[in-house]
Image (cartoon, rainbow, N blue to C red):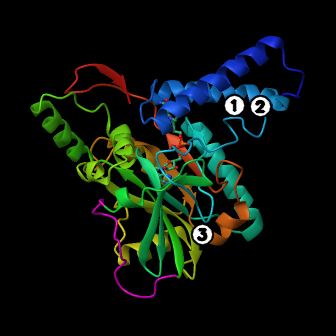
């Protein structure tokens, strides 16, 4: 690590330009569901911003894009506060970086407990995060992530998604529980939707992620109901009275209660197995139900998650590995796009 120094004028200028660009691109992506640049281009600018901050820590303010969860609350929706904060994920872009991250986390857990953690390894679904509040097994509210503290009330839109139960099945529900998941459009549903658009003489949608996000944030739930939205659970917030002690146990319990859990996740014991999982889905990423942009690795045990804690933006017990961007030809549009 280089020692902190007074940033040069050019570093300050580049930094100010980057902050402005990242904020503009985030607004287009999160608030308008209409990105102005590819994810790869966005990630490149964001990484440059992080590098400048690492070298010039005095530039970092509380509202720097690296310190906040991206996404505002649109005036089109009522604002709702989450019971517990929703976070983003720390991204790494190479296997070497991922391995270094996992080894550091493993060493820190081993120091406390004498044993390495188990890793819940799952797909990073390219969709939109939702927070579902269940009271005594009944869905009472659904919200977008927003800035992590406050999201948008999309309860009526979520009510149109068949995967999401309005009432859980079975018994023994906690008094209050926030289930977090990703709303997405399955690849085959996206293809069918675009065939319908083209048949009706309309322009096809550009990609499933932004279509899912735009569909979920419609003012009229009847519009949302026309879109083939699905969801998989990937987390839990407030959990008063929920007796599970790990993320994987929670998924099993939620599945029993009728929540949609992913068929792809695994609990793994070693880093070699985690790397194997990543290699496998790197090869098979287009054979899946939905699009992914990476893999998420999480410490499975809740007590260890709590010990490791969070930064202002991300949990310290989880990391997202992003696959390298690929260039593809979309069949319908026949234009080159980055995905
Ligand atoms: P992120 O997408 O890197 O990670 C956090 C999100 O991942 C969570 O909120 C959740 O919604 C999602 N997720 C999917 N599968 C998950 C799983 N299994 N477990 C946990 N979470 C899971 O972070 P972010 O802050 O939402 O946004 C950054 C991403 O958005 C980057 O991929 C970036 O490229 C993209 N982005 C693109 C633009 C653009 O202009 N193209 C602008 C802003 C952000």
Marking on residue 301: 3
* Disc 1/disc 3 C-alpha distance (Å): 30 Å
Estimate the x, y position of residue 234 in percent, counting from the top left: 47, 59
- Residue 198 left/right relative to 119: left
Asked which quadrant contains residue 331, the reply is: top left
Q: Please report whichever mark, 1 or 3, sits nearer to the chain's N-terminal start.
A: 1
Q: Tell me whether circle 1 and circle 2 mark residues in contact (CB < 8 Å).
A: yes
Q: Residues within 10 Å of mark 1 (few under 14, many from 20)?
A: some
**Residue picked out by circle 1:** 50
Estimate the x, y position of residue 88 in percent, counting from the top left: 58, 48
- Nearer to us in this view, 93 or 225: 225
* Disc 3/disc 2 C-alpha distance (Å): 31 Å
**Residue picked out by circle 2:** 54
Estimate the x, y position of residue 61 in percent, counting from the top left: 78, 36
- Nearer to us in this view, 85 or 331: 85
For the C terminus, give its image quadrant: top left
Give the magenta part as a residue range.
160-174
Q: Residues within 10 Å of mark 3 (few under 14, many from 20)?
A: some
Residue 93, placed above or below residue 56: below
Q: Secondary structure at mark 1?
A: helix
Residue at image location 18% in from the left, 29% down from the top: 202
Asked which quadrant contains residue 298, the reply is: bottom right
- Residue 8 left/right relative to 179: right
Q: Confirm whether the magenta stretch covers residue 63.
A: no
Q: Secondary structure at mark 2?
A: helix
């Amino acid at each position: 690590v280089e020692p902190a120094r007074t940033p040069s004028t050019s570093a300050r200028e580049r930094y100010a330009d980057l902050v402005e660009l990242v904020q503009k691109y985030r607004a287009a992506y999160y608030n308008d569901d209409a990105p102005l640049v590819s994810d790869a281009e966005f990630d490149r600018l964001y990484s440059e911003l992080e590098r400048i901050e690492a070298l010039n820590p005095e530039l970092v303010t509380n509202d720097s894009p690296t310190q906040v969860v991206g996404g505002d609350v649109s005036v089109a929706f009522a604002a709702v506060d989450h019971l517990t904060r929703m976070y983003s994920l720390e991204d790494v872009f190479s296997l070497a970086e991922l391995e270094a991250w996992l080894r550091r986390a493993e060493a820190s857990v081993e120091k406390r407990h004498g044993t390495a953690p188990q890793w819940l390894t799952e797909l990073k679904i390219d969709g939109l995060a939702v927070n579902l509040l269940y009271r005594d097994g009944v869905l009472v509210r659904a919200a977008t992530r927003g800035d992590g503290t406050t999201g948008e009330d999309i309860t009526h839109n979520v009510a149109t998604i068949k995967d999401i139960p309005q009432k859980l099945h079975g018994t023994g529900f906690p008094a209050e529980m926030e289930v977090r998941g990703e709303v997405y459009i399955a690849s085959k549903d996206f293809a069918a939707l675009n065939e319908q658009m083209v048949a009706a003489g309309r322009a096809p949608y550009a990609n499933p992620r932004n279509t899912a996000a735009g569909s979920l944030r419609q003012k009229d739930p009847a519009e949302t109901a026309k879109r083939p939205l699905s969801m998989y659970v990937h987390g839990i917030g407030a959990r008063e009275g929920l007796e599970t002690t790990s993320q994987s146990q929670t998924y099993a319990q939620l599945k029993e209660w009728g929540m949609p859990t992913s068929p792809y996740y695994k609990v793994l014991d070693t880093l070699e197995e985690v790397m194997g999982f990543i290699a496998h889905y790197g090869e098979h990423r287009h054979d899946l139900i939905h699009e992914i942009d990476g893999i998420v690795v999480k410490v499975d045990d809740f007590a260890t998650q709590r010990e490791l804690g969070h930064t202002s933006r991300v949990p310290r017990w989880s990391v997202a590995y992003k696959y390298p961007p690929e260039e593809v030809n979309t069949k319908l549009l026949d234009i080159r796009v980055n995905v």
